[in-house]
Image (tube, coloured by chain):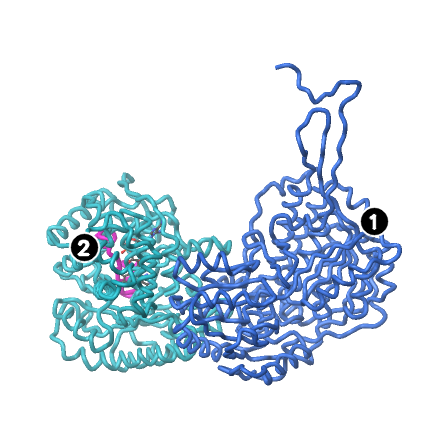
Amino acid sequence: MKCDVLNTPFTNCPHADFVDKAVRAAFAESLEKLKGSLPLKVPVVVSGQKRFEGRTRPRYCPSQKDWQVAAVTLATQEDVDRALAAAARAWGEWRDLPVEERALLLDKLADRIQADRFDLAALQTLEVGKPWREADADVTEAIDFCRYYARRALVELAPRPQGNVWGERNTLWYEGRGVAAIIAPWNFPLAILTGMATAALVAGNAVLIKPAGQSSAIGYGLYERMIEVGFPPDVVHFIPGPGSEIGDYIVEHPLIAMIAFTGSKEVGLSLIRKAGNTKPGQAQVKKVVCEMGGKNAIIIDDDADLDEAVAGVMKSAFGYAGQKCSACSRVITVGQVHEPFVKRLIEACRSLHIAPAHDPACQLGPVIDEGAYQRLNGVIANPGDGATPLYIGTPPSDDGFFVAPALFAVQDPRHRLMQEELFGPILAIYQAKNFDEALEVAVSTEFALTGGVFSRSPSHLEAAKKRFRVGNLYLNRGCTGAMVDRQPFGGFGMSGIGTKAGGPFYLLSFADPRCVTENTMRHGFTPDIPPEA
Amino acid sequence: MRVALVLIVELKKRPITRGRTTTSTRTIFEGVIIMAPSSLQAKILQTAEALTERMKGEKPSLFSKSRWLRLILDLAMEDHEFKVDMFHFVDALPMLTTNEQVSQHVRDYRLHEKRALPLWASAVFKMASNPLTAAPAVATIRTIVTEIAKTFIVGRDTAEALATLRRLHEEGFAFTTDLLGESTVSAAEARQYQARYLDLIRCLAQEVPRWQADAVIDNNHLGPIPRANISLKLSALEAHLDSVDTEGSVARLKERVLPIFLLAQQNNVFVNLDVETWELHGITYDLFEEIVTHPDLRSYPHVGIVVQAYLKTAHEDMQRLLDLVRKRGTPITVRLVKGAYWDYEVVHARQHGYPCPVFTRKADTDANYERLTVMLLQHFEELSPAFASHNLRSLVHALVQAEERNVPPLAYEVQMLYGMAEPERKAVRSMGRRVRVYAPIGELLLGMAYLVRRLLENTANTSFLRSRYHEGTDIASLMATPQSSISFNG
Ligand SMILES: Cc1cc2nc3c(=O)[nH]c(=O)nc-3n(C[C@H](O)[C@H](O)[C@H](O)COP(=O)(O)OP(=O)(O)OC[C@H]3O[C@@H](n4cnc5c(N)ncnc54)[C@H](O)[C@@H]3O)c2cc1C
């Protein structure tokens, strides 16, 4: 098996270097080309058979409500049945392939995505309203997941000897569990989908890909490239459709062996419940890999560098309109830093350039859809008692679902703005008396995903490492933008079950360990005893 | 300001590269034959010796003025850990409002436990570390750091600065001044900054005509030049600068910067655009081009921009400026520097997987500086050269090359930072060359990022001033031709 390429060390795919004029031009060209081909038609694909007929749902551009980006064919329960049956049949052969073969496919997929990186990023600006830089970062993260998991698979899935006793040989290895449902979110439409799907595949599972309704065209972009590089059509199926209609059906299906999910806490918990409900004919206990929300805080210590702190909070709170699970939605200021910090933050919010995401000048784009738009505006209008508005921006137009930044001062750490994940450009600010209280408040939610501290006090940073217990803690930088391998990503508490995407041992969550023990003693002889030295 | 921190974190020991040239006559770009390096080198040595003769016994205020500054620099150069702790402490100091906070930071950075400090110094830190005795010690620390900052900053505000600038002028030195500040995170801050600049121009325009004339610094080879000279940092004039939207960034900046240039022209004030990080490089050059080709500014010669020799694109940058001058038909000034953001650029490129925009061998930067020096001198009528460096080799090389090419002495100038290389600056001036001092104005504590950057620059292993004044390296070795492996065939 030729897999020299996999023996090279992993390196992150560089983000687009927009300093280079040619790079900017290439992105713009992809965007223009794409605009000319809308709306994209997204089929259901079972065993390589595309179906465009039947019920479809339009997807509009969140920056420009009347602009149709895609027509998404909706999968039916019957599609799911056929896909699962085919996947279950194909799974065994896929699982038993040498791991190098599957890993190489991941590496090829990475190359394929990289070749089309700006097409895939441009599509994100239109389908999910992600600004240029962030759309590009999502694509590079997808590439990173492929390359990283390909390399980790060779290490983590390889058989390893256990124990060291003459007369017996023990071998432990991990192998696929069966058919995995990949239920992906729209906020990192390519990266998270690719990460979960390729982890499942390289570990030896067949997959049903169910993209989010808001990002099905991007999901299809991934599916098409997977098939092109050689993933078997019976091993990967593409099942777009509303979660409410086919989501539960997939999760509860007896042929599903595991579920990889990233999304809200509500959906995640209900999915865990449903997966725990054993159906007649079900072959195994379903395993769930689940990444849920966050209510992430950044602490601004009283000795913080405010230049850095304001910039870090702006990026973490309003990057992709706050629609990242890692986004900062609480700021905790320490003592007298509150006033100067808030003053500068308000002005920074006021100058944020709100624009369609496909405009390279966009600093804050739209939120994902009408539902989010209504919900967030509702919260801004009625944040609940005890929230004092510090700044409420005005969106530039209602051509798209633009929600301007909203800052609230809150005195009670239990206030809903300090507890509920809102997934939008809304930031609660709490003034703590001292650093100690700031740490207490920081961990006073049910979530434990990301967090940040801006401080120039080594003892405070040390205390934060111990007591600011979240999956990803960032010291003196913003709390978003985890990179594969460098910052393995994921939380615990109600933020997830403790897996680390883009980190070591993530793949093992997608596999079952098996151990084989062979007695090598025959008639009193064993080859294990070395000849006398 | 952001850069300073990155620089602190990335303090690294780098070897000093020295060597001697042995090559014979070679062709430098554009087909110009320069004299055999050996005879050039002889002249360089000769001039360097003449200059050092004039500097005998003098040390830059950096290495002499305040006992504390000298102490900090000495310790920082001896003890890497101390350097990091001390500079981190100084960096945070402006934000610390209570004695208790300062006391805690002294403990946090273990300044009270530092070895090798003179008794009186460690006594101050020990007192400061104890909350009960902190008050007087903290006051002392603040006074000292403020004193140190004064070495590099000409005044807290324009009024204070004008007195110093006037004194400088009396001593025979021209100036360029800039306003220090926090980094700009909002439009409001950018507008404020712009207003301060407009104000500065008006103040300078009123003040400088009252000064005594000085033929060397008030003129170039063609006649009078503005006495008032300002330097602008674009990152302070607009919060929304992003290469992804280069066109938009340039357009937004133009709105803020154009009024400054127009007012400067009305008041006969020179305006220079400082060049910052690579990320803003394209934006800065595009903006400069738009501004100086603006119909109202086209014929105004008192504008300038910076070329950073550590950039791999520096030669193209120079070429672009030459084309620009030919297009607009009026000369500009080019301040040739090595580049102040070396650590940041290297780290940033590595972290993002971008090609590194700067040379990574000091000798390459030095050699490129010399090559660009020659290019500037070849085109001095279009690109008025301003050699900004504290490196005596780089400067002497420029002086000698200018002489070889019969470039009139007032057709170019030498620039140095306030507080940094006074002996060099006096010596060059005494040879009848125009010397301009880069003089920042700002709140002393807010200028801390600037201060820390200067301290780092001067304690870096590769720093010329360090080898000359701290390590006492002899002049002949310091004058060695930079040995670069890069082939320059621009
Ligand atoms: C009047 C004046 C104005 C200035 N304006 C600007 C400006 O607008 N923009 C700006 O960026 N800088 C500016 N500078 C700073 C300048 O770029 C240098 O950082 C500083 O002058 C030190 O260089 P030197 O020649 O004096 O000393 P030297 O000690 O000879 O050189 C130090 C410089 O060498 C380079 N260097 C160090 N290590 C390496 C390495 N390993 N590989 C490659 N190169 C290395 C770096 O550029 C470093 O600053 C200005 C300086 C002066 C004096």
Q: Which residue is mark 1?
A: A90
Q: Is residue B393 magenta?
A: yes
In what quadrant of the picture does the N terminus of chain B appear?
Answer: bottom left
**Ligand 1 has an atom within 8 Å of the beta carbon of the residue at disc 1:** no
Question: In this orientation, which residue lies closer to the viewer: B465 or B309?
Answer: B465
Q: Is residue A212 visible?
A: yes
Please tell me how crowded label 2 is: few (under 14), some (14-19), or many (20+) other residues with Cα within 10 Å: few
Q: Which chain is blue?
A: A
Residue type at mark 1 is Ala
Query: As drawn, is A287 to the left or to the right of B333?
Result: right
Disc 2, SS? helix
Most distant residue in the top direction: A532
Q: In the rendered structure, which amino acid carries the disc numbered 2?
A: Trp
Q: Position of residue B263 (x, y in %)?
A: 30, 81
Label disc, if present, on residue B120 of the rendered structure = 2
Residue under the image location 54 percent in, 52 percent down: A486
